Image: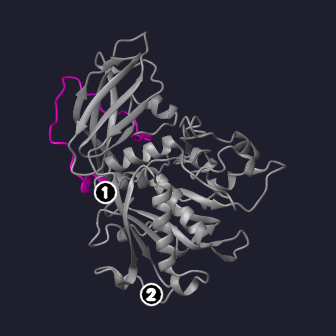
Amino acid sequence: MTFFSKKICALFLLCLSTLFLGCADEESAADILSPDQYPTFTLFPNDQAQNDSAATNLAHGITMIVHPKATYQLSFDIDPNYEAPELQLFRILVNTTNSTMHFKQVRSLEPKVVAGRYVYEFICEESAATQWGTTLALDGDYYPGKVSNVKLTGEGAYSDHFSINLIVVGNVEEEIEDFTLEELASNMLKSFRKYYKSVTIDTLYLRHAQEHPTLGKNYPADEPWISQYDENMMLSELGGWPGSENALDIVLVHYINASGILGYSDLFSGNMGNGYGSTVLLGAHYITPYGKEESVPMSDIVETALHETGHFFGLRHTTATTADIYKTNDDIDISDYSNLEDGIEDTPYCPEAQMAGFFKKAASDTQHPGLQYRIKLFEKAGTFNIRDCPDASNMMFPTALENMELSFSKQQLEIIRKNLMIYPH
C-alpha cells in the first residue's frame, strides 16, 4: 500500500465521502468503539500480500476499500486465547478546516468459524467505491488478541468486459518518429487482448485531450505536455471521457518529469469513471539521470500500459521496491516490511535484487506518493544480473528490461478478473 501525509490523506478521504454515498442500512450498537488511531493502513480486496501492519492495527483502526454490489469476506486466524471479536465498520468523515476525522458506524458483524479462521461476511450497497474504517471489539473494549494472516476477498456483480480510452495530451504525435498514434492504438488493443486473457477488451478509442468537450481548452495541441509533480499530475479530470465514461482511461503525455519513470497508476484504483484514481499515466519519452530526453519505443509504451493497468486492477510488483515498502507520515515510519512481494503463489520474487539495491532510487523524492510505477533501469548493482531474477519475465516486475518476453501468471489473471467485476462499469 502507498500512503499520503495526514493532510493529503484527509483531503482524499473527504473527496471520497463527498463523491460517494455510503450504505443505507446503518446499525446501532450498545458499545461502539470508533477507531482510536489514524487509520494509516489499508486492505484491498483480493490482495494476497501479507499486510502484517494492517493485521496488527485492525482492532484499533485501518481502512478497507469497498465497492457497490460486491460481496466481501474479511478473515484472519483464530487466537485461541480469546473469544471471537465483533467487527465494527465505520463511515469516515473528514473536516478539511482542521483535518480532523470522525467515524459514523455503518454496522457490526459477528464471525463464522471456518477452518481455524474468523470469517466476517457482508454486502455493502454503495453508490460507488469508498473506504470504511474498522475496529474489533470484545467485552466493550478493543480486541487484545493476535490478528494474523488477514485477508479481504471480494466477488463483484459487474461485467468482465471493458473498453479503453487512449487519451493523447499535447503534441505527442509530432514528437514520435517510428510509429503513428493509430499504430500505437492498434498495437495496444491487440496486446491487451493477448495478455489480459481472463477478461474481454471490447474496443479501444483514440482520444485527443484538446477535443474534450469541456476541458479541451486546457490542453493545447501544439505544445508538449510535461506531467509535473502536483495534484494534477495524473490528469484525472480527463477520466470518464464523455461518450465512454465507464472505460479504462490511459493518458499519454510527452514525458513524466522524473528520471526513468515510464508510467504511473494508483494501486487498486477502483475507478472506471472520473475523478481521483481514474487514469493510468504513460510517457512517450523519459528522462535519463543526466536530464536527457529519450523517446520510448512503441513496444515499451504498450508494455508499460499493460503493467500499470495491472496495478489499476490490484496487482502489486512481484518484487517490492524500496518505495513500495518504505512510507512515512509526518516523518514517522509507517512502512509494512512484511510486503516484500505480492504474496501470489504462482509468482516468484527476487530477494537478490532487493539486497543488491536495484530499486533504492525509487524511494527518492522522484517517487510520487500514492502511486505505483514502471521504471527504466540505468545502473547496475554489484555483479548481480537483474535478468536472472525468477520474476523478470513477469508483467508486474517493476523494471523494464530489453528483449524480455513478458506474461501474467494464472493467479494474477484471476485477480484481474475478480477486481474488474468489483469495479462499477
Residue at the spot x=47%, y=61% of the render? 192
| Mark closer to the chain start, 2 or 1 | 1
Q: Quadrant of residue 294?
A: bottom right
> Residue under circle 2?
221
Question: Which amino acid type is marked by label 1?
Answer: Cys
User: Helix, strand, or loop for circle 2?
Assistant: loop
Whether residue 158 sits left or right of residue 403 in the image: it is left
Q: Which mark is residue 314?
A: none
Q: x%, y% of residue 309?
A: 47, 57
Q: Is residue 159 visible?
A: yes
Question: Which amino acid type is marked by label 2?
Answer: Ala
Residue at the spot x=30%, y=21% of the render? 111
> Is 200 located above or below residue 319 in the figure?
below
Please state which of residues 194 and 55 is positioned toward the viewer in this rendering. Answer: 194
Q: Quadrant of residue 32?
A: top left
> Residue under circle 1?
15
Q: x%, y% of residue 283?
A: 55, 71
Q: x%, y% of residue 367?
A: 58, 58
Residue at the spot x=41%, y=51% of the render? 9
Q: Is residue 370 visible?
A: no
Q: Residues within 10 Å of mark 1 (few under 14, many from 20)?
A: some
Q: Which residues are magenta?
A: 16-45
